[in-house]
Amino acid sequence: MKAKLVNITLSIRPFQLADEASVIALWARCDLIRPWNDPQKDIQRKLLVRPELFLVGTCGDAVVATVMAGYDGHRGWLNYLASAPELRSQGLGRAMVAAAEERLRALGCAKINLQVRRSNSAAVAFYQQLGYHEDDVLSMGKRLIQDDREQ
């Protein structure tokens, strides 16, 4: 899939193993990596479950955007949405979300969930512009495997 954006042409395709270093570097530049989430392990786990929903956006040979979508038969999820900071406000994020939504809709997904840090007001505003809204729920989690990485 190709999308003509403001100043670039974005090609969207499933993640390939050769993308790993570029994807992790992009996530680091976008401040998405946390000590409790090892990005290499997150990628390895995603490749075991619906790997076709892990999308990268490229401009030429460069990985400039990502989204890791999931679907469990009940709800869809979006994770690791990233766009190169120097290319922001050109539609990369919108294109990646649209591509993920299209694939999830084709699988019969009726609703997508995502989590955003409350302190990330820019991300909250971005998702609101795309029609996402805050649900009246409490997000809870329990770590089953510790992925702490060396700092």
Image: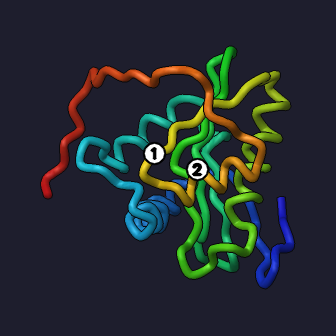
Who comes first in sequence, dot 2 or dot 1? 1
Residue 29 percent location from the top left of the image: 41, 70
Seen at 52% across and 55% down, the residue is 121
Secondary structure at badge 1 equals loop
Residue 47 percent location from the top left of the image: 51, 38
Q: Which mark is residue 118?
A: 1
Question: Quarter of the image holding residue 36?
Answer: top left
The chosen color scheme is rainbow
Secondary structure at badge 2 equals helix
Please give the residue where the numbered disc 2 appears in the rendered image. Answer: 124
Residue 125 percent location from the top left of the image: 63, 54
Seen at 64% across and 51% down, the residue is 55
Seen at 50% across and 37% down, the residue is 46
Estimate how packed mark 1 is, as few (under 14), some (14 to 19) or many (20 or more) residues with alpha carbons within 10 Å. few
Q: Nearer the viewer, residue 101 or 129?
A: 129
Does residue 19 appear to the left or right of 119 in the view shown?
right
Estimate how packed mark 2 is, as few (under 14), some (14 to 19) or many (20 or more) residues with alpha carbons within 10 Å. some
Q: Nearer the viewer, residue 111 or 146?
A: 111
